[in-house]
Image: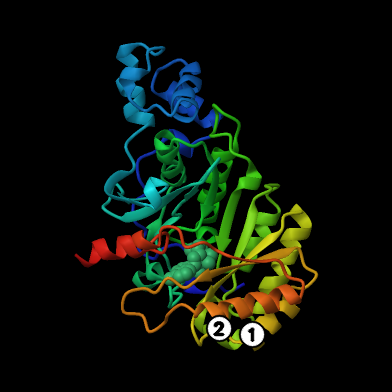
Amino acid sequence: MTTLPLVDAPRRRAALPPRHLADLDLAGRRAAVAALGEKEFRAGQLSTHYFGRLVRDPDAMTDIPVTARGRLVGELLPTLLSAVREQSCDGGATRKTLWRLHDGALVESVLMGYQDRATVCVSSQAGCGMACPFCATGQAGLTRNLSTAEIVDQVVWFAGLSARRVSHVVFMGMGEPLANYTRVVDAVRRLTDPAPDGLGLSQRHITVSTVGLVPAMRRLADEDLAVTLALSLHAPDDELRDELVPVNQRWQVAEVLDTAWAYAARTGRRVSIEYAMIRDVNDQPWRADLLGRLLAGRLAHVNLIPLNPTPGSRWDASPKPVEREFVRRLRAAGVPTTVRDTRGREIDGACGQLAAAEVAQ
Ligand code: SAH
């Protein structure tokens, strides 16, 4: 099988960060602790601090001898993420953090607090190689994959800060999660393993969003994980999708949808079809009708996202009446459809714009 260069690992392999407890399963942690000359059960104690109590300060680890603490924390809980900038809106319910990684790469994550739950939107790569022209992250290209622990730690930080319980995680920050497959799947396992080995989230509360890398979607269906798949479709026809989501030139609409239906059949999970509403580009009534025909009767719902215009882009969001008509036609075709709320808009929520602004300075 040939693959697009886009889908491969970064060409110049950037160094991954130091090893962290969240990179390892419990057996790996025991081995790492033993290699440091410590009792294996210290691995469980460290896991309880990090995942269970959300503690990373050695001074608070009073069940571990003082002499061992510094070394264990230094070796297994190195600092991976340093906050460069924080922004909040919606009265503090939405918070976005820009992180600097050990090599200076920048990524961002967003916390969205609701009445009774909180969702963290994580990045899976620094930058992105998928080159979607309406996405801020896509413009800058791929810097590198994140490590498993760099992904997990974004959630653990917010879990330690949030007044509400972090219950949901969406892979909708920077990067194409399925292009960093092994680390993303490992991160899902760390997030969903019961505490204190992991964070104990429900698999059903994790959403992995993809441009539609068909082989990786098939592989994900075989993982025995009940995670929700979100497919960034953005156009129902190949001619337009080739432009909006360039990877479509490799895996086209019919094939990517077939793979999504196979995922739904295998996991029993309803697939979320993401569709950014772009004025006069993909918002015509005939495209709503075509989308409706493609999705009718399938285990799917449509999530319309008002386009968040990126600086310097020629594209804008669809007018509200156009959006309403698009929704009406999809629903008339029997396709459950929602319009995503635009929480975090003022802080360029989750579309790579904060990191882009920082790089531009
Ligand atoms: N690479 C993954 C995850 C990235 S972002 C993917 O493409 O699915 C999550 C969603 O935000 C995707 O559906 C993406 O297409 C969408 N998105 C990116 N830039 C956007 C923008 N400027 N306005 C609205 N949605 C955008």
Which residue: 75% across, 76% down? Answer: 332
Res 207 visible: yes
Q: Which mark is residue 3?
A: none
Locate the C terminus by quadrant.
bottom left
Locate the N terminus by quadrant.
bottom right
Give the farthest residue toward the right.
297
Whether residue 154 is situated above or below residue 160 in the rendered picture:
below
Which residue: 41% across, 45% down? Answer: 150
Q: Is residue 53 left or right of residue 299?
A: left
Residue under numbered circle 2: 282
Q: Earlier in the sequence, mark 1 or mark 2?
A: 2
From the top left corner, tell me how far across and down residue 331 is, in percent.
72, 73
Give the farthest residue toward the left.
361
From the top left corner, tell me how far across and down residue 79 is, in percent.
32, 37
Q: Which mark is residue 287?
A: 1
Displayed quadrant of residue 72: top left
Which residue: 40% across, 52% down? Answer: 90
Whether residue 347 is situated above or below residue 211 in the rendered picture:
above
Q: Report helix, strand or loop for mark 1.
A: helix
Q: Is residue 60 left or right of residue 258?
A: left
From the top left corner, tell me how far across and down residue 181 is, in percent.
54, 55
Whether residue 248 is situated above or below residue 259 in the rendered picture:
below
- Identity of the amino acid at label 2? Asn
Is label 1 in contact with label 2 (beta carbons under 8 Å)? yes
Q: Residues within 10 Å of mark 1 (few under 14, many from 20)?
A: some
From the top left corner, tell me how far across and down residue 28 is, in percent.
51, 31
